[in-house]
Image (cartoon, rainbow, N blue to C red):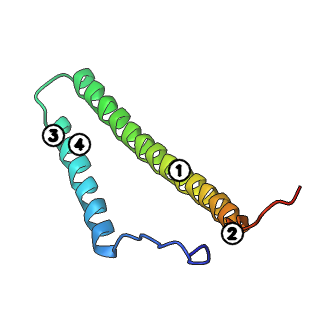
Amino acid sequence: MANTPPVRQRTTGAYFAQAVISFAVAVSAMVVGIAYLHADGWIRAFLGLGMLYLVTSAFTLAKVVRDRQEEDRYANRVDQARLDKLLSEHDPFRVDAP
């Protein structure tokens, strides 16, 4: 069991394309909406900066979540390897002679 390779979980190309297209449509819609908003330039600029801040924060959050999941996966693999080593070295029928 210790020699089995980990299962690689990969997203499909279609799922990746859907995520990219969805993001592009959402950002484009916000940019067009802000550009055609009937308000002063400074209000549109404020909303544009708010949108930019939101997008960068979303990317940062996604990266932090991904990094934490990878750290947990590696820590679990190390713990599993230690447990496998302890179990393989343990002999329940061994008697220690005094």
**Residue 88, which numbered label?**
2
- Image coordinates of residue 90 in percent, x first then y, are 70, 64
Contact flag, marks 4 and 3 (Cβ < 8 Å): yes
At 19% across and 37% down in the image, what residue appears?
A: 35
**Local crowd at mark 4 within 10 Å, few (<14), some, or many (≥20)?**
some
Q: Residues within 10 Å of mark 2 (few under 14, many from 20)?
A: few
Q: Say whether disc 2 or disc 4 marks the residue closer to the N-terminus.
A: 4
Above or below residue 82? Residue 14 is: below
Dividing the picture into quadrants, the one containing residue 77 is: bottom right
Amino acid carrying mark 2 in the image: Ser
Query: Which residue occupies 14% across, 24% down?
Result: 39
SS of the residue under disc 1: helix
* Camera-nearest residue between 44 and 83: 83
Give the residue at mark 3.
33
The answer to whether 63 is drawn above or below residue 5 in the figure is: above
Separation of residues labelled 4 and 3 (CA atoms): 5 Å
Residue 51 locus on image (x, y percent): 30, 35
Which residue in the protein does label 1 denote?
72
Separation of marks 2 and 3 at Cα, in angstroms: 64 Å
Mark on residue 31?
A: 4
Residue lying at the far right of the rendered structure: 98
Above/below status of 22 relative to 62: below
How many C-alpha atoms fall within 10 Å of the one at disc 3: few (<14), some, or many (≥20)?
few
Query: Given the image, on which type of amino acid does mark 3 rest?
Result: Gly
